[in-house]
Amino acid sequence: MARQNADQRREAVLRAAVTEFGRFGQDGASTTAIAQGAGISQGYLFRLFPSKRALFLAAVERAFQETEAALRRSADGSPTFPELRRRYEELVSGGDLLRLQLHVYSGALEDAECQEIARRGFIRLWRTVAELTKAPAAEVLDFFAHGMLLNVLAALGFPLPTGRNALASSFETWAADSPVEPPEARSAW
C-alpha cells in the first residue's frame, strides 16, 4: 500500500470525523476513533488539526461541501427539482451527513461559531440550488422545506421511499398506523 501524503491523510481524517461526529456529536466523539478510522496516530491527528473543536468545525464544513458537490453532480446538464430531490434523498438515507447535519443544527442553538459555519454552509446550498435550477425563490424554498422534512423523518426512523408521491403516501400510512401515546399510556387502557 502506498504511503499517503499530508493532504490524503487530512482527507481520510475528515471522512472519519464526519462519521464519528455524526454518530456521537462533538462532545461524544472520540479522537482516538477518528485517528484509527483514518489510519493514523492520534498524535498525528493533532498535528493536522490543533484541537477536537477545530476538527469538528472542519468536519462540519466538509459535510456542507460534500452535500453541495453531490447536488452539483446530480445536476449534469439541466437539473430539475426531482433530480435534486432524489440525490438529497440518497444523501439523507446514507446516514453520516444527515446525523452530522442534525448535530450541527442543534448545536447552533447555543454555539455562535457552529451557527456561523452552518449559516454559511446553508446559504451556499441555497445559492447552489438556485443557480442550478434557475428557479424562483419560492420553488427553492419548497426544495429546502422538503429536505428538512426528510431530515426529520429520517431522524425519526421513517423509511424514506424515493419520490415525492411515494413519500407522501408512505408517510400517510405510517402516521395512520403508528401509535401516538407513550407505551405506558397504551398499556393502561
Image (tube, helix red, strand yellow):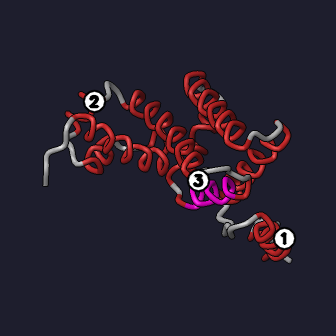
Placement of the C terminus among the 4 image quadrants: bottom right
Q: Amino acid at mark 2?
A: Leu
x, y (%) of residue 77?
62, 50
Crowd band around label 1 with a 10 angstrom C-alpha radius: few (<14), some (14–19), many (20+): few
Is 111 on the left or on the right of 148, as rendered? left
* Residue that extends furthest to the front in the rendered view of this protein: 77
The residue that mark 2 highlights is 48
Is 127 on the left or on the right of 170, as rendered? left
- Say which residue appears at 14% left-offset and 45% top-offset: 3
Q: Is residue 86 magenta?
A: yes
Q: Amino acid at mark 1?
A: Glu
Crowd band around label 3 with a 10 angstrom C-alpha radius: few (<14), some (14–19), many (20+): some
In the image shown, does 184 or 66 lie closer to the viewer? Answer: 66
Is 173 on the left or on the right of 45, as rendered? right
In the image shown, does 94 or 173 lie closer to the viewer? Answer: 94
Residue 172's mark? 1
Query: Of marks 3 and 1, which one's residue comes earlier in the chain?
Result: 3
Residue 74's mark? 3
**Which residues are drawn in magenta?**
83-93
